[in-house]
């Protein structure tokens, strides 16, 4: 038997012995899938938290718009206490004052965010209150995957209410 043939058989024997064995390759694959699964859970948790914060801010804007729609303008009552016709008139000034007062008097819903701002508080027709609030929320569990949003995510919501 020549030396070349002997080496060839030795190589074939080693390859045949190695076939079917993973030698730790499944462990690396499992660790990789585990890391991807953990990162996926973190991203989904952060997205859910931001969505829930948006819903909370929307609820705050709804309540502020309702409070503004309930305000009575000083033009509603005449000098002798007589009511003006045409329902309860709203003005931009009374709507904005009511929204700012509501947000200031109810700090509990806004405690999670970095400053709730009244972006807009107007009345387009004198009977409806339109409110736009803005806030910055921070995702929980900031990792290197969520690092671009570590400064916070801007939330802006619109709400409206109609005076009766």
Image (cartoon, rainbow, N blue to C red):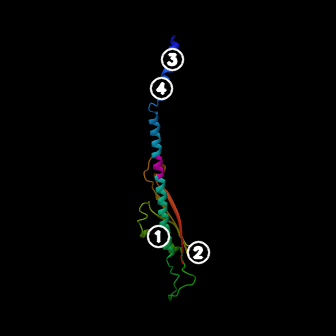
Q: Quadrant of residue 34?
A: top left
Which mark lies nearer to you, 3 or 1? Answer: 3
Per the model, the C-alpha gap separating discs 3 and 4 is 14 Å
Quickly name the residue at label 4: 18
First in sequence, mark 2 or 3: give its number.
Answer: 3
**In the rendered image, the vertical position of residue 76 relative to residue 95, given as above or below:** below
In the picture of the structure, the residue carrying the numbered disc 2 is 125
Q: Nearer the viewer, mark 1 or mark 4?
A: 4
Q: Is residue 139 magenta?
A: no
Q: Mark 4 and 2 residues: CB-CB less than 8 Å, in contact?
A: no
Give the Cα separation between the discs numbered 1 and 4: 74 Å
Q: Nearer the viewer, mark 2 or mark 3?
A: 3
In the rendering, at what x and y percent does residue 143 appear?
Answer: 44, 47
Residue located farthest toward the top when viewing the structure as drawn: 1
| Closer mark to the observer between disc 4 and disc 2 | 4
Q: Earlier in the sequence, mark 3 or mark 4?
A: 3
Marks 4/2: CA–CA distance: 81 Å
Q: Give the residue at mark 1.
A: 100
Measured Cα–Cα span from mark 2 to mark 3: 93 Å
Q: Can you identify the residue that label 3 sits on?
A: 9
Q: CA distance from mark 2 to mark 1?
A: 20 Å
Q: Going 50% across and 16% down the picture, which residue do you hit?
A: 7
- Residue 41 in the image, given as x and y percentages of width and height: 46, 49
Q: Quadrant of residue 30?
A: top left
CA gap, disc 3 to disc 1?
87 Å
The residue segment tinted magenta is 39-44
What percent of the width, then of the height, locates residue 60?
A: 47, 66
Label 3 near label 2: C-beta < 8 Å? no
Callout 2 crowding tier (Cα within 10 Å): few <14, some 14–19, many ≥20:
few
């Amino acid at each position: 038997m020549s030396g070349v043939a002997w080496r060839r058989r030795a190589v074939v024997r080693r390859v045949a012995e190695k076939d079917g064995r993973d030698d730790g390759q499944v462990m690396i694959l499992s660790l990789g899938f585990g890391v991807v699964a953990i990162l996926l859970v973190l991203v989904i948790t952060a997205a859910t938290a931001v969505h829930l914060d948006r819903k909370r801010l929307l609820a705050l804007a709804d309540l502020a718009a309702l409070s503004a729609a309930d305000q009575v303008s000083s033009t509603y009552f005449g000098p002798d206490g007589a009511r003006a016709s045409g329902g309860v008139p709203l003005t931009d000034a009374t709507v904005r004052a009511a929204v700012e007062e509501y947000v200031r008097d109810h700090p509990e819903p806004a405690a999670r965010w970095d400053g709730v701002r009244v972006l807009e508080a107007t009345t387009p027709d004198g009977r409806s209150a339109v409110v736009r609030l803005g806030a910055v929320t921070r995702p929980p569990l900031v990792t290197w995957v969520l690092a671009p949003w570590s400064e916070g995510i801007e939330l802006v919501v619109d709400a409206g209410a109609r005076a009766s």
